[in-house]
Amino acid sequence: MIGRLNHVAIATSDVAAASAMYRGALGAEVSDPMDLPEHGVRVVFVVLPNTKVELLEPLGENSPIAAFLAKNPAGGLHHVCYEVTDIRAAAARLAEAGARVLGDGNPKIGAHGKPVLFLHPKDMGGVLTELEEV
Amino acid sequence: MIGRLNHVAIATSDVAAASAMYRGALGAEVSDPMDLPEHGVRVVFVVLPNTKVELLEPLGENSPIAAFLAKNPAGGLHHVCYEVTDIRAAAARLAEAGARVLGDGNPKIGAHGKPVLFLHPKDMGGVLTELEEV
């Protein structure tokens, strides 16, 4: 069912410093920061030949990554996102397997403008897992 | 400098259960478990079209993932690995940027039989980061 790894997301309290580190020490191609107020994050993309890394900084009140950074002030690996071709079929298969979808169980429109859902980390070996329809 | 994302590693106390979840709920292609006693892990590969996820279970005494699982008993995202073409050049660039290489600062032969190094998470935004020469 799952296809490509769409991205790995890393939470940071300072996306500018993280960008400088990926550009400098690792010599990576890094995008300009982009604010996504409706998703509560400022995001920078580290562009790799086969996938991307998203550096996320909290933006505004109620950012979905604020609690993670409170627990992990230095930042860290936040979630992974896999691509699926039919997110409703994916949600049905997951429900059957007993994996809980966060929220009301229905896909939402995600930060890339495509339907996404997040799976409960407790059902995914401690890993917050996003599925995105492509 | 960095190229492809070679893999994302997930630590788990039960690679068989994690395999069943990736195969079942996520419908992924999952390899048979492989023991790497010299690296202190049992590993399963989740094969994606563009990269792979490595599920790691501690093997034997002094497993490099034992401390992580003691802190995160449910498992979780453990590290990311980027490919480089010249790991000694990478190590020199990292040293210049002030990023510390774990151990004695020199590349070692990693779990895939290729030269690798690990960067100190404190220098990488809280993310344990591996570089592998390909």
Image: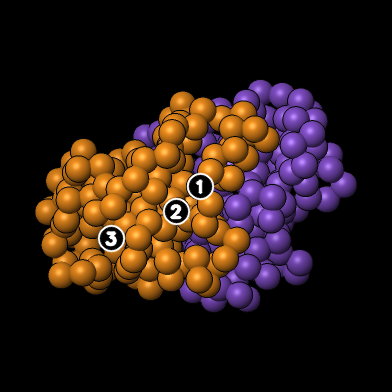
Chain colours: A purple, B orange
Tag 1 residue: B15
Q: Residue at x 60, y 71 (%)?
A: A69
Q: Residue B94 location in percent, x, y?
A: 22, 62
Given residues B28 and A74, the one toward you in this image is: B28
**Can residue A26 be seen from the camera position used here?**
no
Instruction: Determine the CA span between mark 3 and mark 2.
Output: 19 Å
The answer to whether the residues at label 3 and label 2 have Cβ atoms under 8 Å apart is no
What residue would you read off at disc 3?
B118
Q: Position of residue B24 (x, y in %)?
A: 65, 32
Viewport quadrant of the N terminus of chain A: top right
The reply to whether the C-beta atoms of the residues labelled 2 and 1 are less than 8 Å apart is: yes
* Badge 2 density bin: few <14, some 14–19, many ≥20, Cα 10 Å: many
Decide if residue A101 is on the left or right side of residue B133.
right
Chain under label 1? B
Determine whether, in the image, residue B126 is placed left or right of residue B94: right
Q: Give the SS element for disc 3.
A: strand
Q: Which residue is mark 2?
A: B57
- Label 2 vs 1, first from the N-terminus: 1
Sequence-wise, the earlier of marks 3 and 2 is 2
